[in-house]
Image: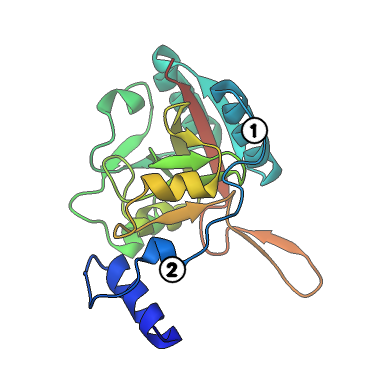
Amino acid sequence: MSTRERILARIRRAQGETGPPGPAYAADVPRDYLRVHGTRTPAGTADLLARNLADYRALVHRTDEPGLAPLLARLLAAHGTARVLVPHGLPAHWLAAADATRVPERPAPTLHDLDRIDTVVTGCALAVAETGTIVLDGGPGQGRRRSTLVPDHHVCVVRAPAQVVDSVPQALERLDPTRPLTWISGPSATSDIELDRVEGVHGPRTLEVVLLATD
């Protein structure tokens, strides 16, 4: 199989097509790298996620189910949120205590509407501890991609340890590659040639992650 045929076969596989007969993709790519760096308990994995998120300048909070609604209300109030975007499928009780106007994601708001949103609250597909990364796949409660990129403040709830994996290889095994995956490592930021960091350029300026205990 030529390089061109190999690339086209991978594209077909990613799109859910079988394509012409050929070497299996799993056998085509060597996978002899470490799947996990170190040995951790589920609690240790959640702690590592929290540390790496903080390294990326995300704000990390911990709570249990009864404390989630009051915590989200405090986070929105502290940010001065007047309008909060509510993705389709977000549990209603999450924002039950919030003193802000709830803007439903359906019907889909325009970009001008999104620009007037102060905060978006979402769940996630999973989170990767070793890289401090949150992954959204557009599932219930996660919102459309632009819904999490336009508002300046994103609050993301991660069920820990249920939605936390150690490594990227473990994450890829649990994710559907045909879904619109958004990988988030901290708030949006970029640097110019003089390394002056500017946040909020192509995504939220502030990312807050709530680790929701599920044990």
Q: Where's the N terminus, which quadrant? A: bottom left
Helix, strand or loop under label 2:
helix
The amino acid sitting under disc 1 is: Leu
Helix, strand or loop under label 1:
helix
Q: Dot 1 corresponds to which residue?
A: 48
**Residue 151, position as x, y percentages in the image:** 44, 52
Q: Inspect this view and state whether residue 157 appears.
A: yes
Q: How is the image coloured?
A: rainbow
Q: Inspect this view and state whether residue 153 appears.
A: no
2 or 1: tag closer to the N-terminus: 2
Marking on residue 28: 2
The amino acid sitting under disc 2 is: Asp
- Of badges 2 and 1, nearer the viewer stands 2
The quarter of the displayed image where residue 101 is located = top left
The quarter of the displayed image where residue 73 is located = top left
**Residue 149, position as x, y percentages in the image:** 44, 57
**Rendered residue at 29%/43% (across/down):** 87
Please tell me whether residue 129 is drawn above or below residue 203 in the rendered image: above
**Residue 93, position as x, y percentages in the image:** 29, 23
Report how far apart the C-alphas of labels 2 and 1 lie in the structure: 33 Å
Please tell me whether residue 200 is drawn above or below residue 56 in the rendered image: below
